[in-house]
Each structure stands twice: as C-alpha cells, then as structure tokens.
Image: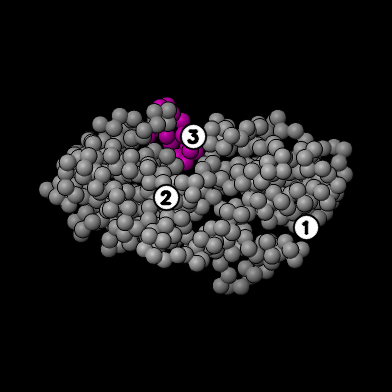
Amino acid sequence: MVFNCIYNGLISGNEKLALVGLGYVGMPIAVEFAKHIRVVGYDINEERVNEYKNGIDSTKEVGESIKDTTVEFTSNPSRIKEARFIIIAVPTPVNNDNTPDLRPVEGASRIVGQNLSAGSIVVFESTVYPGVTEDICVPIIEKESGMKCGVDWKIGYSPERINPGDRVHTLTSICKVVSGMDEESACEIKKVYDIVIKAGTFSVSNIKTAEAVKVIENSQRDINIAFMNEIAIICDKLKIDTDEVLAGMNTKWNALGFKPGLVGGHCIGVDPYYLTNIAEKLGYHSKIILNGRQVNDSIGAFVADAAIKEMIEAGMAPKKSTIVIMGLTFKENCPDTRNSKVVDIIKRLEEYNIKPIVTDSWADASVAKQEYGIELTAWENVPKADCIIIAVGHNEYRNLSVMQLKELFKDELGDKEKVLIDVKSLYRIDELKASGLRFWRL
C-alpha cells in the first residue's frame, strides 16, 4: 500500500482531507486547510454543521471567514470515505471522578473505522494520555474497518495547541508537534501539516512521546498557576496585595510571570488528570501534579468565601443581598464555558442559599442552562448590586472605568458598603483605593 503520495494528491486537488470533530479545535483547522486544499468537515452535531453551512461561527474562532470557506461541512459520516488523510479532533473531558472520559475518541474511532478507505492516514489531535492512540483507538478502527493498521492504513498523532479566544497565538503561528507510527507516515504527516503551519512542525520519534508532550506542557502550566494561587491565599492572610507582590517579583529577570486565577477549560483544567491517571496505572502516585490540581479546584470556593466575608464586614446580610457575577466562560473574550471554574463560585454561594445574578454576553445562554442549570441575565437587565464579582476578564469589563463600575451598585449604598471582588485584578489598586469602594483582589 502506498502512503507517501497523499501530500501530492492533496496539493494537486486529487485527494481530500477530512476533519472529524468541528468544535473549537477542529473547525479552525478545517477552515485553515481549506485555504490550500479540498476539505470535508464532519461533525455528529447536525445543528452545529448547519450553523457553519449558514456562515455562523458560534465558537468565534474564525469569525466572518466562515462565510467564505470552501470546507464541505457535513453530518453524514460516509463523506469521510472521500478522504485519505483524516484528522480527529474531538473533545476529551473527564468524568465526575476526574478519570479520563474516552467516549468521544472511542466514538470517533468507530465512525472513522466504518468509513475508512484503504491507503489512508489517520491523525489524532485529541488530548489523551500516552498509549491511548495505539492501544485503544487503533484496535477500534481495525475492528470496524476490517483493515490492519500498518498494512492497509496508518496512524499518527499531533497534539492540538489552539488557544481559544487568542488572536495572537493562532493555529498557523504555533509550532506543531507531529508523529507517526513509522518513518513513512511521520514524513507524510509532517508534509501535510507544513501546508498550513507557518511556525513550522517539530517531529518526535513516536506517538506516545507526542501524546506525552501535550499533557505534560499543560500540567506544567497548571502547577505554576497552583503555586500562584497558594501565594494568593497566603497574601490574603497577610493582608497584602498579591498583584503588587507579583509586580515586584517580576522585575527579576528569571521570574516566570504566572498569575493566580480560576483554572478551568478543556485543557489545563483537565490534562493533568490524564497524566496522573496513566501514572497510577503504572504504579506511580503523583506527589505534585494532583496537589496542584486540588489547589486550583479550590479557588472558586475561596473567592466566594472572600465575597461573603467582605459583605459581612460591610454590614450586609449576604442572603438578602444582590450579588452580580460578571463572566461565566472559562477565559476572557471567548464563548467557551467548558469546565468553567466560575461555576465553583456559584456553587459555593448556593451552599449558603445565595442565588447570584450571572451575566456574560460571550456565553451561550442555552448552553449555560443545559450544562450547569445557570440562568444568564442579559447585561441590560442586570439589577443594581450590593456586591459585584468580576470573574472573567472580558474586554467589556476591562474597559469599564472605576466610576462606571460604581454606577452598577445600588444608589442607596455608601461607597464603603459597595463590595467589588476583582478576581482578575483588572483595575489598578490606586484607582480602587481612590474610589472608596470596599474591594478585594485574588
């Protein structure tokens, strides 16, 4: 079977590339490749596919360019047969007990196996622990296709590095790690990705190494942020401002520049559990990674407790107060609410029988209701507040002046009774002090 002519076939227009999974990762990849080659974009979600066909990008990752793309969007899995280079980019969440939920990649493997053409190369981008691609996905594809991996088709892995909402570090400007099951597949996979990755590709020797790259790079970031979150807790007890401490620390050349915050989302808040899960299976219990994740998972409750403490000190009865939470998405300027840790703030407040008003113009209200049972309030309908928790650094919130912030509070409150919880330290401390507001920053 010949595999080293797929790249030439794609460039000449005789072959197609198929993208399986059209979410925050898959859709931008499909659109970028379609600028150069023929692309079939498949997703199991018919509603999402129809949105793309109608030029609507609910992910806001490619914006208006969705209207001009030549991607052949479809929810018909048989269209995958038209391609001999298949990229799988489906989500890999965790279960309630924080164990890996491999159902999406297993389901995608079955669909691809049922619609696989001989002579194809299948590349997984979904974040998994080392071994999943070859030990779990390959057997499923072999069973469904009736074809032998390495003989009738080949496998590769290239971890996704897309950063949702980031307009600087985009798909084409981030170096892409690539791997294949052998030299032939690795070479062909590299050539295909080099079509779109301007920053270049970095080849590693095997698939397990490529899988490890992704979970380790995100676990490293998670641990660094966990350290900063611990520092924030200590600074709070010392009654000193964390942001000022870090500003001083960052004047040294070797400071790393991390900040405390809510660490959720589909990568950093999840990938460490994939890494520690495989470590446990191999007989090693994590001493650092899991502790870091526990710290980061506790910050939502810490913020909520700080808000309640500030309200009590301001003479309020928290249960009778109007608390407004600004922001629900897992990060700024992005509609993605997956694994949002703002939800932890809300849950903690609900433990005290406090139901906050939540607003976020970036988030999809139907998704918030379906996934978390949270009713989003439109910005224009948000009532005047006793306490405001700014949980996400959307530009709309960042651009509010302190005077505009003060107008969001109840008129009858004195400045020292108005409680502002600035989770992201969006506002300068000198301005906050001058405002007279009672404020707290993480």
Circle 3/circle 1 CB separation < 8 Å:
no
Measuring 37% from the left and 56% from the top, which residue is drawn there? 129
- Say which residue appears at 57% left-offset and 32% top-offset: 369
Q: Is residue 282 visible?
A: yes
Q: CA distance from mark 3 to mark 2?
A: 27 Å
Whether residue 414 is situated above or below residue 221 in the rendered picture: above
Give the labeled residue for mark 3. Answer: 58
| Left or right: 186 in relation to 241 | left
Q: Is residue 51 magenta?
A: yes
Residue placed most toward the observer, 109 or 37: 109
Give x and y (percent) for residue 397: 67, 44
**How far is the residue under mark 3 from the one under mark 1?**
38 Å
Residues rendered magenta in the picture: 50-71
Please give the residue where the numbered disc 2 appears in the rendered image.
100
Select label 3 or label 1 by which is in front: 3
Task: Please state which of the two labelled residues, at mark 3 or mark 2, is closer to the viewer.
Answer: 2
* Residue designated by label 1: 430
Q: Which comes before the other along the chain, label 3 or label 1?
A: 3
> Which element is circle 3 on?
loop
Q: Residue at x 29, y 42 (%)?
A: 109
Q: Is residue 267 visible?
A: no
> What amino acid does circle 3 point to?
Ser
Circles 2 and 1, Cβ within 8 Å, touching? The answer is no
Residue 49 relative to residue 139: left or right: right
Q: Tell me which corner region of the image, top left, top right, bottom left or bottom right, holds residue 292.
A: bottom right
Q: Position of residue 205 (x, y in %)?
A: 27, 63
Residue 357 figure quarter: top right
Question: Is 77 left or right of 146, judged from the image as shown?
Answer: right
Q: Secondary structure at mark 2?
A: loop
Which of the 4 image quadrants contains residue 179? Answer: bottom left
